[in-house]
Amino acid sequence: MDINNGTQKTPAEPSRRDILYIATGAAATVAAAGMVWPLISQMNPDASTRALASTEVDLSTIPLGQIVTVKWRGKPVFVRHRTPEEIKAAENVPLADLPDPEPDSKRVQKPEWLVIIGVCTHLGCIPTGKAGEFDGWFCPCHGSTYDVSGRIRSGPAPSNLEVPLYTFLSNTKIKIG
């Protein structure tokens, strides 16, 4: 209540000017969002980059004892269907004999399937499969030799061939990445 004249004050009715201010502010907000959206959207990776983020491999097409090379993130990935003899040879290597000791069981999810990035850890060459004294991989550039588990056995390479993140989608399909 207003003390001076004893009447009760009521809230002011919105004027045309108030409505114009609100409409102008809303239009400016929509326009700003319309300008910012393309700037934010262009920071997302393009479709070709998203396509390389992961790749699926059908294992049913890889015969026992064979190696298939697939491309993932611009790098070769070796998928090897190991024989029982290769699995036994990989599991029976004394870790003390390895320059970069790592058990075979830590490098595979299923013993018959080895998935490794095919880039030599010395200078980034691509080793050849089923080569070298351990029937694994051999890098002809500098002489690094890897076994059937992708572990360094001799040569200048400082570490084992890298194992990428991969998951089994089914018994016959894996997803790398």
Image (cartoon, helix red, strand yellow):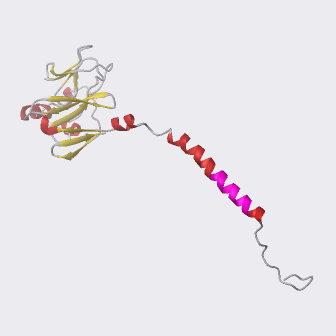
At 65% across and 56% down in the image, what residue appears? Answer: 26
Quarter of the image for the N terminus: give it: bottom right
Quarter of the image for the C terminus: give it: top left
Q: Residue 137 lies in what quarter of the image?
A: top left
Q: In the displayed orientation, state which residue is furthest to the bottom.
A: 6
How many numbered discs? 0
At 16% across and 38% down in the image, what residue appears? Answer: 59
Image coordinates for residue 115, horizontal then vertical, percent: 22, 34
Q: Is residue 152 above or below residue 2?
A: above
Q: Is residue 19 above or below residue 67?
A: below
Q: Residue 96 lies in what quarter of the image?
A: top left
Does the magenta portion include 23? yes
Does the magenta portion include 89? no
Image coordinates for residue 168, horizontal then vertical, percent: 21, 45
Q: Is residue 101 visible?
A: no
Q: Is residue 66 left or right of residue 108?
A: left
Image coordinates for residue 13, horizontal then vertical, percent: 77, 72
First to last magenta residue range: 19-29
Image coordinates for residue 118, horizontal then vertical, percent: 26, 26
Q: In the displayed orientation, state which residue is furthest to the left.
A: 85
Q: Is residue 59 left or right of residue 31?
A: left
Foreground pick, 90 / 51: 51
Foreground pick, 47 / 26: 26
Q: Is residue 77 visible?
A: yes
Q: Is residue 99 left or right of residue 2?
A: left
At 75% across and 63% down in the image, what residue appears? Answer: 18
Foreground pick, 145 / 120: 120
Q: In the displayed orientation, state which residue is furthest to the front.
A: 16
Foreground pick, 114 / 9: 9
The prevailing secondary structure element of the residues shown in magenta is helix
